[in-house]
Amino acid sequence: MFAERIPPTPTFELLAEGLTKKGFATADHVLSLQDVLVILEEMRAQEHAFKKSGIGQANDYTVLHTRRGDYIKWLSMETAPEVTKMYLQFVHQLRLFLNRYCFLGLQDLEAHFTKYPVGTRYVRHVDAFSKDDNRRISIVLYINPSWTNGDGGELLLYPKSEGTPEKISPLAGRLVIFESTIEHEVLPSKIERHSITGWLLHEKRFF
Ligand code: OGA
Ligand code: MN
């Protein structure tokens, strides 16, 4: 069981506290290196199903390679491979914890595998859509076992008002959560960069 692999409560409390005080938080070693490596294999096994990501929603959706270079594969609880699924269950537990701790009323999760090929980036943006604020909390787990300083691909989180951005390295097993209205960008990555990217949603929707 995942609950035995991850001691959630202290991690959840730190994440909730950071989110409340600063609008973002990180936690390291949320997964063991072994689990990270298994997720990387699970992602690679679905390589053929990855699609070029786009920007916007529904009728506004466009693919712009220069602004956003990643490839994605949407996940569902029913079909996700084993360790990926356990991670998604962990995120749902975090969602329930945040609802209790911060009264956020988050009803659902959407998530995808993400791959940035060498040399790609995602320019400064927000995750909440301009006409739809259903995405409330962005949540990213990094799956880069060989990442070292100089490889690029860091996440920059811009402060809500003034100040210098926070730079977060995409280290294996690191989780970052932030309010989806916060501006952020992914710096160009010199290595292939993997993550599971998700959003905690205000409303559950059935399409
Ligand atoms: C995104 C995003 C951040 C990251 O997918 O919208 O900004 O660090 N990801 O991967
Ligand atoms: Mn984003």
Image: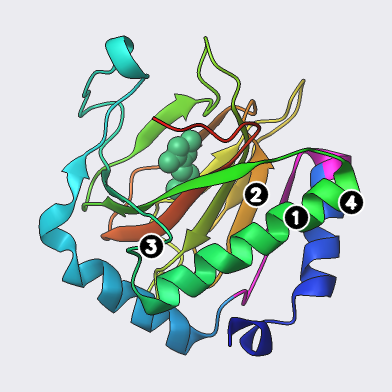
Mark 1 vs 2, N-terminal side: 1
- Residue 52 showing in the rendered view: yes
Point out residue 129 in the picture as x, y percentages from the top left corner.
Answer: 50, 19
Point out residue 15 in the picture as x, y percentages from the top left corner.
Answer: 78, 57
- CB under 8 Å between callouts 3 and 1? no
Residue at 75% over, 74% down:
8
Tell me the residue that label 1 is attached to: 96
Image quadrant for the C terminus?
Answer: top left
Mark 4 vs 2, N-terminal side: 4
Q: Please tell me whether residue 25 belongs to the stretch shown in magenta.
A: yes
Of 67 and 150, which appears nearest the observer? Answer: 67
Question: Which element is circle 1 on?
Answer: helix
Density class for disc 1 (Cα within 10 Å; few <14, some 14-19, many ≥20) is some
How far apart marks 3 and 1 lie (CA) works out to 19 Å
Tell me the residue that label 2 is attached to: 177
Question: Which element is circle 4 on?
Answer: helix
Mark 3 vs 4, N-terminal side: 3
- Label drawn at residue 101: 4
Mark 3 vs 1, N-terminal side: 3
- Is 53 on the left or on the right of 180, as rendered? left
How far apart marks 1 and 4 lie (CA) works out to 9 Å
Tell me the residue that label 3 is attached to: 78
How far apart marks 3 and 4 lie (CA) works out to 28 Å
Q: Amino acid at mark 1?
A: Leu
Q: Give the magenta part as a residue range.
A: 20-30
Question: Which element is circle 2 on?
Answer: strand
How far apart marks 1 and 2 lie (CA) works out to 14 Å
Image quadrant for the N terminus?
Answer: bottom right
Q: Please tell me whether residue 15 belongs to the stretch shown in magenta.
A: no
